[in-house]
Amino acid sequence: EKTDAIARLGFGVLEKVGLRFDHPFWDAHTYVFGVADGHETGEPTCVVNCASVLGQPLLVLLYGGEAGLQMAALSEEAARDRAMATLRRMFGSDIPSPRAIHRTGWSRDPFAWGAYGYVAVGATPADFAALAAPVGDRLYFAGEATHPTQWAAAHGAYLSGLREAARITDDEGLLPARHFEENRRWRAMMTRATRFLNLRTRAIDAAELIERERLLGRSEPFCDIDAQELRHVATMMEPVVLATGEWLCHEDDEAHHVYIVRTGQLEVCKRASEGIVEMLGPGDLVGEYALLLRSHRRASVRALTDCTLLSLEYHRFERFLLAFPQASLALLRRTIARFVK
């Protein structure tokens, strides 16, 4: 399980170059400066101002991806010159030279070969949990890539160490106060969700997004949700096309997605019933119960006509339900009604 999770997860490059000066020549109260077109020119995309939090005249330039690999390969003198070229473009050619340089070299460190984990294409948050799971009662795992919400951050590594120390000693007093952790977790989740939804919204045609919202608005458990929240769900979905006679899923298949029918008709079949048990059309949901009763299909579903659907991965659907409890209640009512028929 661990080697499979490692193969799926990504491992990112980030190098930092800190330049210390005698006095700030920049706005000492601004925490971070953006670098215009930095991702296109190989420069850092942001510069952190340590004077705003530490009171020290230190600027830290962050280099990711190919720019980070290039920076790590430079000599200290060449790294300083490259960083200063960026600062001169930002603040003017007459700025003073730095008193000292501090830099990382994580991507060339044989004990690291990179900086942080991330959810690559094909990976899921469950891979972080797989890395965190102990092996027996003798081998325990910590590190930022084992934390469920604070991966890619130094405090994720720190909190994971506390978690494992508490597990080994059976002393939960080693963990941070619960209210503090929940607040940070919620804030981090909403920040990541905002970035994701903004990217998705820009990637979808406006007319297509409106059509998705209308479809969701006619379907349980989404019909009672306000328009802005409905838009969030609509941006998360992916289109699926089925030809007449094509199977969407088979009974006992592993379940990963919930579907909403956009056009066409589908039939639901169960082996025990030896026939069709339900017909589905536009606005109907398929597979929502497997979210609650993990994690295999309880029936087979086949297209009676050419169909289009929208799909939503369970881990995204689950996060939506946690954020919007009125949808969770509607889904629970629907599921209970189905099983008491």
Image: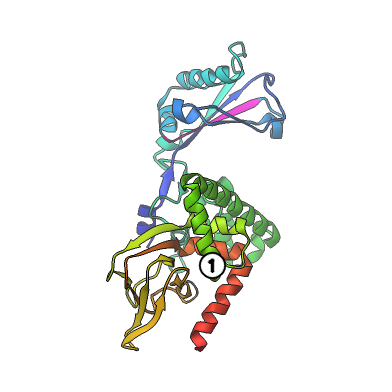
Q: Indicate the amino acid at tag 1.
A: Arg
**Residue 97 found in image quarter:** top right
Decide whether the magenta segment is chiefly helix, strand or loop. Answer: strand
Magenta region includes residue 265 = no
Vertical relation: 12 (above or below) 159: above
Magenta region includes residue 62 = yes
Place of residue 238 in the rendered image (x, y in percent of width and height, measured from the top left): 42, 57
Marks counted in the figure total 1
Seen from the viewer's position, the closer of residues 48 and 133 is 48
Residue 192 visible in the snapshot: yes
Query: Which residue appears at 43% of the width and 36% of the height?
Result: 65
Query: Which residue appears at 69% of the width and 28% of the height?
Result: 56
Query: Which residue appears at 49% of the width and 88% of the height?
Result: 341
Seen from the viewer's position, the closer of residues 279 and 145 is 279
Vertical relation: 263 (above or below) 68: below
Seen from the viewer's position, the closer of residues 213 and 111 is 213
Vertical relation: 242 (above or below) 32: below
**Within 10 angstroms of label 1, few (less than 14), some, or many (20 or more) residues?**
some
Span shown in magenta: 58-65
Place of residue 51 in the rendered image (x, y in percent of width and height, measured from the top left): 69, 29
Query: Which residue appears at 59% of the width and 68% of the height?
Result: 327
Q: Is residue 106 left or right of residue 96?
A: left
User: Disc 1 marks which residue?
Assistant: 218
Q: Secondary structure at mark 1?
A: loop
Location of the N terminus by quadrant is bottom left
Seen from the viewer's position, the closer of residues 151 and 195 is 195
Place of residue 169 in the rendered image (x, y in percent of width and height, measured from the top left): 58, 66
Q: Residue furthest left?
A: 245
Q: Residue furthest top?
A: 94
**Residue 266 found in image quarter:** bottom left
**How is colour applied across the structure in the image?**
rainbow
